[in-house]
Amino acid sequence: MCRVLGISRSGYYDWQKVSPGKRELANQGLDQRIEEVYRQHKQRYGAPRITKALKARGEPCSHTRVARRMRALGLKALVKRKFKVTTDSSHNQPTYSNVLNRDFSTTGINQKWAQDITYVRTDEGWLYLAVVIDLYSRAVIGWSMNSRMKKSLVCNALTMALFKRRFPKEVIVHSDRGSQYCSKAYRTMINHHGLMGSMSRKGNYWDNSIAKSFFHTLKVELVHESRYKTREEARQSLFQYIETYYNQQRLHSAIDYKVPNEVEYAA
């Protein structure tokens, strides 16, 4: 082989004896730890979150270096897809004014909650999911699933949030103008528990962007990578994602790359 390649045997044996340099060894160690975080989070983390996760473990690294090593390893976070607006606000039911008015800032929990509904495809048909998110911690504090998109879907999600937070008063509870949020049962809950109803302007995605952003993340990181044979299979998968991963493990950029439950417990 040396003769074919035109190199001396002594040169080949000298090359074999050369050990990797410090930088190469450091990169090999960093690559291993990057891959560990990447696999642990099921390809959901890109360079910013992996950098934060490694620094939390005491690993000295920069975002630039992690991004460079990920490119060398061929690692990419799951690709986002275009969000599709599904709210049907074509009804004549009463609505709340836009009290939130895109002011997503908070100084503590139970000041502002955001709500929304999405759907998940299964081989048995659609499964609908309603959530309630605290804007301070970005934790999902209430959720409900049903095979039909009824008013009880949103009422049950709000009930869970109220029980979990011990029935706070004067919380701004924001949603879009979907008919479920305009139902008499829902409005009765808002009034009975001393909450402040708030609704997006008609057809305005950004007024409820926090809740819609959560669903976008859910679809990209879980739903688009899965095929559910039954609604029960989808329920279990969504439950695991929300309660054991999103709330307890996933670093959230809007809260300085902390975990929602970590912010909850510190509040």
Image (tube, rainbow, N blue to C red):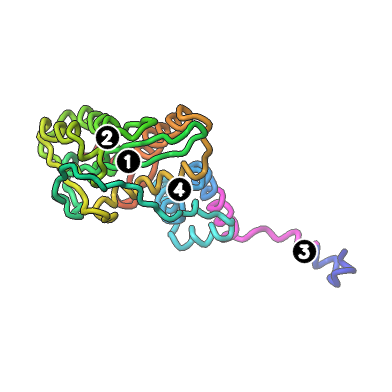
Q: Using a 10 Å C-alpha cutoff, classify the residue at mark 4 as few (fewer than 14 neighbours), some (14 to 19) or many (20 or more).
A: some
Q: Sequence order check: which comes first, mark 1 or mark 2?
A: 1
Which of the two discs, 2 and 4, sits closer to the camera?
2
The residue carrying mark 1 is 117
Quadrant showing the C terminus:
top left
Whole-Å distance between the Cαs marked 4 and 1?
16 Å
Which of the two discs, 3 and 1, sits closer to the camera?
1
The tally of labels here is 4
The residue carrying mark 3 is 14
Which of the two discs, 2 and 3, sits closer to the camera?
2
Q: Using a 10 Å C-alpha cutoff, classify the residue at mark 2 as few (fewer than 14 neighbours), some (14 to 19) or many (20 or more).
A: many
Disc 2, SS: helix
- Magenta residue check for 159: no
Which of the two discs, 4 and 1, sits closer to the camera?
1
Disc 3, SS: helix
Task: Report the residue at 46% width, 63% height from top.
Answer: 64
- The reply to whether callout 1 and callout 2 are in contact (CB within 8 Å) is yes
Whole-Å distance between the Cαs marked 3 and 1?
66 Å
Q: Sequence order check: which comes first, mark 3 or mark 4?
A: 3
Q: Position of residue 224 (x, y in %)?
A: 49, 45
Whole-Å distance between the Cαs marked 3 and 4?
50 Å
Residue type indicated by callout 3: Asp
Residue type indicated by callout 4: Val
Which of the two discs, 3 and 4, sits closer to the camera?
4
Q: Sequence order check: which comes first, mark 4 or mark 1?
A: 1
Q: Position of residue 9 (x, y in %)?
A: 85, 66
Q: Sequence order check: which comes first, mark 3 or mark 1?
A: 3
Task: Report the residue at 21% width, 27% height from top.
Answer: 163
- Magenta residue check for 29: yes
The residue carrying mark 4 is 220
Q: Position of residue 264 (x, y in %)?
A: 25, 38
Task: Between residue 112 and residue 192, name the one nearer to us.
Answer: 192
